[in-house]
Image (cartoon, helix red, strand yellow):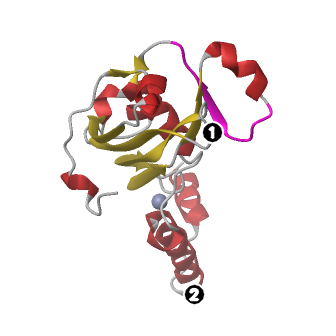
């Protein structure tokens, strides 16, 4: 695997037949635009950027076992659900999928591995998108130490103390004044 994934710019096909690729031991490395993944793009504030793809299609142990494994990575801007500010969210998925033709599917249902049943070429970006969506956190938030929401909570508490310790602002004073002017 390349230590510097940002430097990869291999040409990736739009559609793939995973089983054919696995039969000849292919490896796909490169980037796909985040824009080609609308379901993933709609979860972030900025739909630009690239998704790093490094997928190996290979024979596993035994003649008939074909699998797809590798690494998918994307950095995107999401909304922190604690403070509602933007945050950088780095998602990494490490798919490990057993590749099966539909007619093979029934015998393999007990297997612990994730299974991709495929009988025709499929969209590479949709496949990558599916795996990244699975890796997406349900509730994205900043690290607590970095979240402005935490600072905000502290500040609120501080202000409250200042009000009781310092000059007391009586919220009803305004009401009293209004009553007097009547
Ligand atoms: Zn936050």
Percent position of residue 179, x then y: 58, 53
Q: Is residue 67 magenta?
A: no
Please say whether residue 3 is visible from this viewpoint.
yes
Percent position of residue 15, x then y: 35, 20
Residue in the picture at 25% in, 38% down: 48
Q: Which residue is mark 2?
A: 165
Local crowd at mark 2 within 10 Å, few (<14), some, or many (≥20)?
few
Say which of marks 1 and 2 sits in front: 1
Q: Does 71 sit above or below residue 58?
A: below
**Which quarter of the picture shows residue 105?**
top right
Q: Earlier in the sequence, mark 1 or mark 2?
A: 1
Observer-nearest of 180 and 122: 122
Q: Which residues are magenta?
A: 110-119
Q: Quadrant of the N terminus?
A: bottom left
Q: Secondary structure at mark 2?
A: helix
4 left or right of 94?
left
Please say whether residue 85 is visible from this viewpoint.
no
Q: Which residue is mark 1?
A: 62
In the image as oriented, which residue stretches furthest toward the right? Answer: 110
9 left or right of 54?
left
Q: For the residue with label 2, is its CB less than 8 Å from the closest atom of ligand 1?
A: no
Residue in the picture at 60% in, 18% down: 101
Q: Is residue 116 magenta?
A: yes
Residue in the picture at 42% in, 15% down: 121
Residue in the picture at 27% in, 55% down: 5
CA separation, marks 1 and 2? Answer: 76 Å
- Most frequent secondary structure within the magenta stretch: loop
- Count of numbered tags: 2
- Whether the residues at callouts 1 and 2 have beta carbons within 8 Å, the answer is no
């Amino acid at each position: 695997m390349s230590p510097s994934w940002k430097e990869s710019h291999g040409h990736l096909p739009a559609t793939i037949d995973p089983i054919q690729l696995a039969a000849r031991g292919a490896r796909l490395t490169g980037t796909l635009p985040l824009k080609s993944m609308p379901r993933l793009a709609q979860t972030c504030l900025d739909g630009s950027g690239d998704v790093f793809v490094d997928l190996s299609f290979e024979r596993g142990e035994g003649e008939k076992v074909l699998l797809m494994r590798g690494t998918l990575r994307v950095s995107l801007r999401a909304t922190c659900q604690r403070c509602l500010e933007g945050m950088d969210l780095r998602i990494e998925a490490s798919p490990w999928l057993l590749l099966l033709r539909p007619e093979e599917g029934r015998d393999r249902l007990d297997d612990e591995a994730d299974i991709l049943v495929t009988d025709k070429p499929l969209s590479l970006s949709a496949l990558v998108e599916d795996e990244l969506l699975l890796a997406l956190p349900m509730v994205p938030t900043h690290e607590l130490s970095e979240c402005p929401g935490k600072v905000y909570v502290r500040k609120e508490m501080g202000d409250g103390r200042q009000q009781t310790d310092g000059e007391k602002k009586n919220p009803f004073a305004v009401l009293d004044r209004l009553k007097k002017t009547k």
